[in-house]
Image: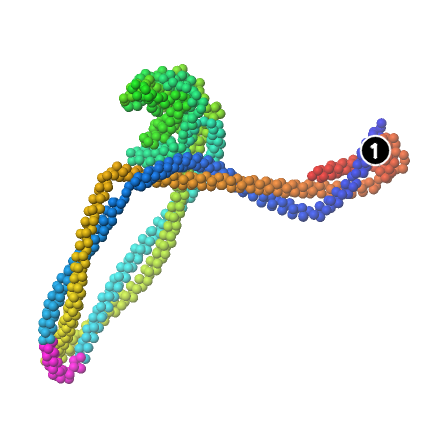
Amino acid sequence: MKNKDKLLYVSAAVLAAGSVAGVKTTNVKAAEVKQADVNANSKLDLNKADKIAQTQIKQDTTSVQKTQDQLKQDQTAKTQAESAKTEAQNTLLAKENIVSNAQTKLNQAKQELTQTQAQNKDLHAQYDTTTENAVDMAQEAEKKLDQKVNDLSGQVQNAQNKQTDLLGQRTNVEGEIKTNTETLTNVNEQLNKARAEQTEAQNHFDAVQKDYVPIQNEYNAKKSAADKAAQDLKQNETDLAQSQKQLADLQTKNNDLAKTVNNTQGQLDNANKDLANTKTDMNQSQAKLNDVQKQNSDVNGKLTSAITKRDQAKSTLDSQSENQTKIVITPEFNKAFHKWMDIHDLNHVTLTSENKAEMVKELGDLSKQEAEMNHFESNAKDKEHKIDMMHLTYEDRLEANKFGINLVNQIRTQMGKKPVKLTVGSLKYANDVAKYYEADYPTSNFGIDSVNHDTKAIDKALVENGVKPGMGGGEASSYGTYYDSDLDGRFGSFSIKNMDDLKHEIYNAVTGWMFNYEQEEWLHASIVTSMNMWDNTNYKNHNEEDPTYFGFAIMANAPHEENGAMAGDFSIGLETIVDNTIPGNPLSHPIDYNKFNVKDVISTDNSDSSQAGQVYASAQNEVNTLQGQKTDLDNQIKSLNDHITQSQTRVNDLTKTITDLSAKLANAKTEQGTVQGQIGQVSKHVDELKAAQPALIQANDNTVNALADYEQTHATVLNDYNNAKSQLEQANNKLQSATKANDEAEKVLNQNKAKLAHINQELDAVKAQLADLTTKLSDAKSSQTSAKANLEKAQADYDNYVNTHKDLIDSIAKSDKELADKEEAVRVAQADYDKASQEYKAAKKEADKLANKVKDLDQSIAKSQETIKLLNNRIASNTQIIENNKQVHAQAAKLAARKAFDAQINKALDNVVYGTKTISQHTAKAATVKPAVSTKNTKHALPQTGANDKLSLFAALAGLSLSSIGLGSLVLDKKRRRN
């Protein structure tokens, strides 16, 4: 085939393909072009829709974040509420047990009271009260008459006293009247004499005044002039002195103001400096507070997670321990015990003689509640397991140890301590201790009455088991008897006959160590929990515990004579070993593990429960650590907040001080200017007063001399006038005094006469009353004598009845006392029950409150989750809208480009000349690529082979381009439908 033919074949094939594709493309093409036109017209609408969608997405994203924050807060609050709810439910259980016990005691006390009341009623019914009532009535009658006689005697005595008093008053008043009469006579004489003297003085004054009248006016004028000149001089001197003092005061004030200005300026400078320093310190404290709050937030998050982890571990542990005999530790006891016994607790209080009473009160009250709440649960299978305390088998000791160690680990896990291990080595060590105790005390109570602990036996067991003497971890022991009898053994009984009995004793021993409120001692509890003196925390890291191994030493000796009877003693000892072998630890004691087997650990519970206990203990320790950190951070935050508050207060105070000092400084300067102006004015006035002084002195001297000369010239007339005037004034005063004295004497005399008449009237009334009372008293004394006789007879009859019914009366007295005791017991029991009920109601209210809080938080969490879901869906929808709009924009751009290209192709095709010859075999063959198109269709016929090569090549290329666009349009159409 020639090259030209090859080119035409390829071009024809490509063009044919483009033509065939154009069959489907035509409609698609038209539609897309139309859509492109629409999109072009709606471009602004799409942009607006994108903007609205983006705005909504932004708002929804913010809402999702806020809702997620709220969800996180609610989940944290729920975790804390569930933890508090668990503690509240534990407390509620403890309170419920206390209420039950109190109810039982109250019912028993009421029952005993009812029985006693019935017995007391029966005894009182046998007692005949006739003679006793007769005595009571006779005593009452005698008492009333005695009182009547006493009352009447008192009334008679009062009347006699009053009569005597009135007689004395009459005598006194009669004497006063006599004296008043004499006084009035003397006063009248003085009055008459004063009247005569006044008349004589008045006559003398009238005669002298005739000579005085001619010179009176001139004398008065000269005297007035002299007085005025003296007054003017005195006034000027007074004004001068006052002005000079005012000037001195102003100068002093000016000096003081200058000091005030200087001092205030200094204080203002210091206050501004203090304010700047305080603000700097406050900013530093705020920065530190922000840092501590961030740390606190981190610790809070960790604590929330730790509490959730702890609660889950506790739930798992509880579910795996449902069928075990339990010892429950309430949160209150746990907290108080750590406070007093855990030396690593953040709230630990060191025990001293001063605070021992406080410790005993707090732990004692809580221990009593714990002891009353925890009870041993018997096991039927263990009752069938018979044992001999003198010949316990290894299996017996193993089972007892597993039970005891399980109890210990229950306590330890609840109190945040790791479970101890029971190993083959610790069991052997405990059994050896028991063996050597039994050897040292074959016929006594294992040293309880003397040394308490057999250190010789303990050290011997330590050495045999690879530990140095004196290096054990402590021993807690409990003592009792398993057999009791009289000396000949006729009434012997065993108190420990089976495994259930032995486990009960172990349970009592452990709870006795833990809740020893009766002896006010908790050192044995510290051994159980490895705290205080027996602390087992790691030497270098107190958040970890050294390996700890426990075992129960169960010992017994043969029945023997003891205190006048036969007894078989037993003792239960908790033996402990702590492996604290750490280089540098001064308390370290190496253990020979060839002798002390710690590899073979004996399970004290199912493995899941044991593992769960360790997980719970670890989680509790983590919670304790984080709570300690949180407490420390909270204290820092409080301290910083307090410091910032104090600093802010200081800033406020300093700001106010600066404002006040600034005002004070301005006022002082203003006042200083005013004072300086006043000094100038007063100085000028002082100078004026000093200048006027000589003229005033001269005027005063002149008027004084003129008055003196006039007085000397008329001395006789003036002297006579002044003397007569003075004598007349004296006579008038004397007459006035005498008249007043006369009036007063008459008034006093009349008052005493009226008083005497009133006294005589009262005396008559008292005499009549005294006669009546004397008669009544005589009658009452007669009745009193008869009442005494009646009482003596009634008392004799009663004494006779008492003597003949002494046993009954003693029984009644005893019954009355017993009844009072029972009533008091009911009162105490009722008070205990009421208190327990109130505490239970409060605990239940708190538990219900927390349950409701958890429920509310669940609803809030669900609502938040639903809100987040809806918001996320809307965000996805808006995102899809934006994505679709992007595709529409892109498609519109492509269609617009294709439209332009199609215009160019169509224009080019319009120039193509179609031939009429038969299509060659090669061309026809090529046209069969798309059989759906007829080869006879002249409209889409291929160009003739004879056409111009250049035109054929162009057509071929155009066909290839159309084919590509058509196929591309089909792909876009499918893609659009899929979207």
Q: Is residue 70 left or right of residue 791?
A: right
Q: Nearer the viewer, residue 728 or 837?
A: 837
Give the magenta range. Answer: 191-220
Q: Eyeballing the image, is 271 above or below 365?
A: below
The picture quadrant where one finds residue 533 is top left
Q: Residue at x 30, y 40 (%)?
A: 126
Q: Residue furthest right?
A: 917
Q: Eyeballing the image, is 738 above or below 560?
A: below
Q: Is residue 838 left or right of residue 931?
A: left
Q: How many marks?
A: 1
Within 10 Å of the Cα at label 1, are there few (<14), some (14-19), or many (20+) other Cα atoms?
few
Queried whether the magenta region covers residue 340, the answer comes back as no
The quadrant of the picture occupied by the N terminus is top right
Q: Eyeballing the image, is 134 above or below 719?
A: above
The percent coordinates of residue 499 (x first, y second) are 41, 21
The percent coordinates of residue 359 (x first, y second) are 33, 34
- Could one spot residue 975 in this view of the protein? yes
